Image (spheres, helix red, strand yellow):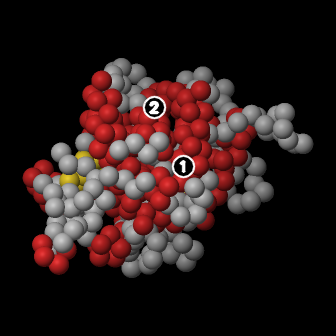
Amino acid sequence: MTMETPASPSSTPGRPAKARIDRRIARLQELLDSRVAETAQNARRRVWQPSPRTEAVSQIAVRSRLLRVTEDHPGMTRIQRVSASKSAALQVLLLALFEQQVRSPQTKDSRTRLPISYNDNPLLSTWVEFTALPTVDSTKRRTHPRTAKANRERQIKRALDRLADCGRVEIEPERVHGRYERFALLDEGTNNAPGNGTTYYARPKPGRGKTRRLVVTIPVEFFLNGWLDALSDNEIITYLTLRLMAQAFPDRHAEGGVFLAQAARQDTFNLDRGFEAHRMLSRYGLIDTIRDRRRNADGTMDNFEEIGAGQIHRFKLDDSTLTQPAIPRVITSLTRFAQGLDSDFALLSDAIDRRTTPKTAS
């Protein structure tokens, strides 16, 4: 297994990359210390399998048009339009898809079962419990303080506002009491902009042959073990894109890995610099990055004129990593990256960690 070396933490323009990584580590650590991540994962497990006798789903299917550039959605893809700095919209959207698909197949209602922040049923989770958002209790630092729970509720509502603006959910009009409660999920692969009508959500059916390219499936461990909470938006988008490629070309993936040439990345998925997230996905162990042995660790080639362009990177998914707790794994990888450790050594250390870390039961 040959891995690619991520760029140095100090090589990113703008604010020092190490400072950004340190802040990200601190946010993830706060999710652990406050037990917000544990609460969210327990809430998801209760919804996923409310009793041992319940037959639980193993995969969540997402329509691939969410990830692709389409004629009715030129430029940014639908998932990229949802994503925004300091917004939980992407996480809330994927959790809403999860919540819909773990229901009984007989359930056809596209509205969420979960209240936003309060219910009188101890067996029913709320969205505040269901999401793992890094917030602090500001009761001692603000003129009009909010508790950590109130902060999370506010983030969820702002995320739903963004999703409504993007045509991914339907909420009640402004000034309607409880406008976020029982929000309706809309078809994630359809243009629900004004003038195009509204297509409410119905779970997709994975197809065979080329029709399997209409959906990408995600193991439930991605949600149950906190990978959704630990990854950045760019990492999630890149990961789902590589999952789609692996499922669209299963034989190629099994034999030597799938690849994304620059033209396909940009024209099909609008992935340019954001695709660099594959470097960290490799560090976390979610993918194996296989490079031409003639390439240097940073992807460049010496004596280019003599030996030619060489082979582009290929990728293989490693779903076994999803069975492990995500946040400690990502914190460790980010810490080693920020310390500027030799990448090959860090990858070896990470691989040892992954093989010695107990798996989480599903």
Q: Quadrant of the N terminus?
A: top left
| Mark 1 or 2, nearer chain start | 1
Residue located 66% across and 30% down the image:
119
Q: Nearer the viewer, mark 1 or mark 2?
A: 1
Q: Secondary structure at mark 1?
A: helix
Q: Nearer the viewer, residue 53 or 272?
A: 272
The residue carrying mark 1 is 18
Toward the viewer: 25 or 135?
25
What amino acid is labelled 1 in the image? Lys
**Residue 18 position in % (x across, y down):** 54, 49
- Taking the spot 9% from the left edge, 52% from the top edge, the residue there is 255
For numbered disc 2, what is the local secondary structure?
helix
On residue 328, which mark appears?
A: 2
Q: Residue at x 15, y 57 (%)?
A: 293
- Above-or-below relation of 62 to 320: below
Does residue 83 appear anywhere in the picture?
Answer: yes
Residue at 39% x, 60% y is 276
Q: Residues within 10 Å of mark 1 (few under 14, many from 20)?
A: many
What amino acid is found at the position of numbered circle 2 in the picture? Pro
Report how far apart the C-alphas of labels 1 and 2 lie in the structure: 18 Å
Q: Would you place residue 75 above or below residue 49 in this image? A: below
Is residue 118 toward the left or the right of residue 74 in the image?
A: right
Q: Is residue 325 left or right of residue 209?
A: right
Front-lying residue, 230 or 96: 230
How would you rate the neighbour count of disc 2 (Cα within 10 Å): few for under 14, some for 14-19, many for 20 or more? Answer: some
Residue 315's label in the rendered image is none
Residue 109: x and y, percent? 48, 47
Question: Given the current orientation, which residue lies at the most extreme front position?
Answer: 303
